[in-house]
Amino acid sequence: MERVLIKDAPKHIGEVVKLCGWVNVRRDHGKLVFLELRDRTGTVQAIILPDAPEAIEAAHDVRPQFSLMVEGLVKERPGKAQNVEQTTGNIEIEVKSLSVLAAPSVELPIDVSQTEMGLQLDTLLNYRTLALRNAKIGAIFQIYSELLAAYESAMRSAGFLEIKTPKILEAATEGGANFFKIDYFERVAFLAQSPQFYKQAGMSAFERVFEIGTVFRAEPHFTTRHVNEYTGFDAEMGFIESMEDVMAALEEAMFAMFEHIGKTCQEALALHEASVPERMAIPRIRLTEALEILKAEYGKEVEDQDIDSEGERLICEYVKKKYGSDLVFLTHYPTHLRPFYSMPSPEDPAYTETYDLLFRGVEIASGGQRIHDPKMLEEQIRNKGLNPDDFKDYVDIFRFGTPPHGGWGLGSERIIQRILDLGSIKEAVLYPRDVKRLAP
Ligand code: AMO
């Protein structure tokens, strides 16, 4: 007999079908045994009646998380209203035979059958492989899978070529100290802090490129929005007139992703009581103006002309109230806060043609226009106290003739975190890495 998926079982009322799955819950009522069975498509109730003694016998030791194969009659559950579309919730499987494919060989450390497990994040991460079988945790990764598909599809539709760039590098890309050094045969190498240089090189050949790739950051802090390994959604595009073109492309990609998730993940979103933002123009505010708003509206002062995480939360609150938008672009960051490759603003070189995109209180993307003139680039490298000789391969990209261009780096897990309002970004990473955690 061919296996039937649980979601298709309602099409087989009155027939005997074969199902495979995990036991979510077992309940015994007198001589009746009820099993909630789960496969990749859903859950269904299986019932073992006393008139199936072999099945009763086979089910004797069955407990949650056993992997089973059952054959049974698909029946409407008693009490179902007439003319209602059949779903797995209003059928049950009357088991005729049952075989155990695999049984846990240890006592289960956590019970994943309840939607709300009420456990600490650390416990859930310690038993991650089991915790992922929980419906609400599993839903995060169903949405994540759709996010990956949606970004790829949105970028391809907009004419971007998908590339994969190296993650073992000769030099650190983003400056600062948050890079990992590794032994590379006789030399030292660095794990990529971003695909910045290679995506610009890709753009110089293909005009529009995007990457879905691993990013490594040696963040020594414990925060709710940093991990040491994350997946970046990067993009770079050539022949731009200004960074406005780049923000428009990012805005389009964001709403394409939100709309796709809204359509394909209704059940998963409902489990988290979450929804995606409606399409609307994303407000753009200069950073200096945002800092004035913070002072005037919230009495908040900042240091170093920079906005901190509290400031980001408050400015999002303000934008939501004033414009009804869950997203906001903050633009024109001061030069001293941005990497050397950022294009200085033509009207005032103390500022840059760069932006951050904030979503429901948190920065999810950074980007801007880049310097494409090699002389200007070398000057900016020097201005940052760095040596142009250390960036020769990078500067060479621009010696071959490169159009005005820009792009973004978008943190994929932060998008999920903000859509679902997760307490920590780690909940949106399958096996997160932080200062203390390297396993599982
Ligand atoms: P930036 O360093 O701002 O910019 O990173 C881009 C986006 O990546 C996400 N992010 C992180 N997510 C989880 N854990 C971390 N430790 C972490 N660090 C960053 C954030 C952030 O907005 N090359 C530039 C981008 C560009 O200009 O194209 C860059 O890497 O969502």
Image (spheres, rainbow, N blue to C red):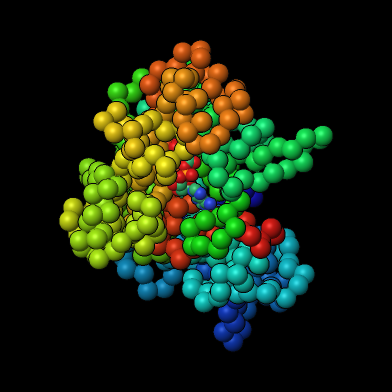
Residue 264 picture location, percent across and down: 39, 48
Q: To which quarter of the image does residue 372 belong? A: top left
Q: Is 182 left, or right, of 435 in this rendering?
A: right
Residue 217 picture location, percent across and down: 58, 48
Residue 172 picture location, percent across and down: 61, 38
Q: Is 189 left, or right, of 307 in this rendering?
A: right
Specify the farthest residue to the bottom: 30
- Examine the rendering and report whether any part of residue 9 can be seen: no
Residue 423 picture location, percent across and down: 46, 66
Name the one closer to the observer, 193 or 41: 193
Q: To which quarter of the image does residue 190 belong? A: top right
- Residue drawn at x 73%, y 62% as measured from the top left: 102
Q: Is residue 110 above or below residue 380?
A: below
- Residue drawn at x 23%, y 54% as measured from the top left: 292
Name the one closer to the observer, 267 or 273: 273
Q: Is residue 68 above or below residue 62?
A: above
Specify the farthest residue to the top: 400
- Residue drawn at x 41%, y 29% as measured from the top left: 370
- Residue drawn at x 31%, y 61% as measured from the top left: 301
Q: To which quarter of the image does residue 78 belong? A: bottom left
- Examine the rendering and report whether any part of residue 171 can be seen: yes
Number of dots carrying numbers: 0
Q: Quick one: quadrant of the C terminus? A: bottom right
Q: Is residue 410 above or below residue 218?
A: above
Name the one closer to the observer, 384 or 25: 384
Q: Is 275 left, or right, of 120 in this rendering?
A: left
Name the one closer to the observer, 382 or 275: 382
